[in-house]
Amino acid sequence: MSTQGRRARPLPAAGGDPGAKGGRTARRLQRPGWRDLRLVVGVLLVLLSVAGGTRLVMSLDDTTPVYAAARDLLPGQPVAAADLAVVQVRLGEQVERYVDGTEPIAPGTYLVRGVATGELVPVASLGTAREALDKTVTVPVDPSALPGLSTGALVDVWVSPRDPDALGVSYLDPRLLLSGAVVDRVPEQGTGLGAGLGRASVSVVVPADRVGDVIAAVDQDARLTLVPAPRSQQDAGR
């Protein structure tokens, strides 16, 4: 039998559907289902959880190093590194009231008030040797001298002892008792009477080793006069 005049039938593509046109399979697009939305929500929840945990860890670590007393610290004593310990605290804005634990204690720092063991060291508890050792003494002065005095001013303390040989009230020549005292408080004019009639009580800060001299002059009814230091000394003392 002759095969001429017949055409060969094309074979279907390998692995394809014989009924598909051109060997290609048509795919139908589908709308996102509820399962896809649930995946998105789950991812968002995970991200929020991670962000919240990170913020919580950062807030728990929001502390500031400050100094605490390693032992009982007494007023007037110098402060050394061995007297302090660095502790981490969370005090917010109040942390400025305490000594920064990242800064070394400056040489010549003294306690102006006591700090108990374990207590945070306030900034106000530290000062210079003079601030720690000097004492405040009240002296009687002539009220007419008050207008020339002010808190924080430097004054020289002059004393005129009573003349023991005089029949009445008489004073010997004045002499310089103390230079560079600091006026701590000046009473209002017309008030603050004390240590004798017609005298006004003025508080002055004097070195600890000179307190006895000032008190002795007051007890012996000597006349004390506070003379303001020159302006150049006033500016140098600030």
Image: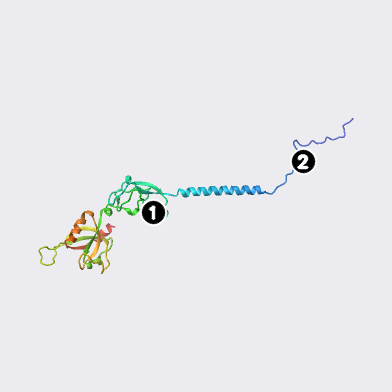
Mark closer to the chain start, 2 or 1:
2
**Distance from label 2 to label 1 (Cα)?**
82 Å
Mark identifier at residue 9: none
**Residues under numbered marks 2 and 1 in contact, where contact means CB atoms less than 8 Å apart:** no
In-front residue for pair 72/27? 72
Q: Amino acid at mark 1?
A: Glu
Q: Amino acid at mark 2?
A: Gly
**Residue depicted at 39% across the width and 47% down the height:** 87
Question: Residue at label 1?
Answer: 96
Residue 98 higher or lower than 185, as above or below: above
Mark identifier at residue 22: 2
| Left/right of residue 227 with respect to residue 3 in the rendered view | left
Element type at marker 1?
helix
| Left/right of residue 201 with respect to residue 98 in the rendered view | left
Q: Position of residue 27 (x, y in %)?
A: 73, 44
Element type at marker 2?
helix
Q: Position of residue 180 (x, y in %)?
A: 23, 58
The crowd level at tag 1 (other Cα within 10 Å; few <14, some 14-19, many 20+) is few
In-front residue for pair 109/8? 109
**Residue depicted at 49% across the width and 49% down the height:** 56
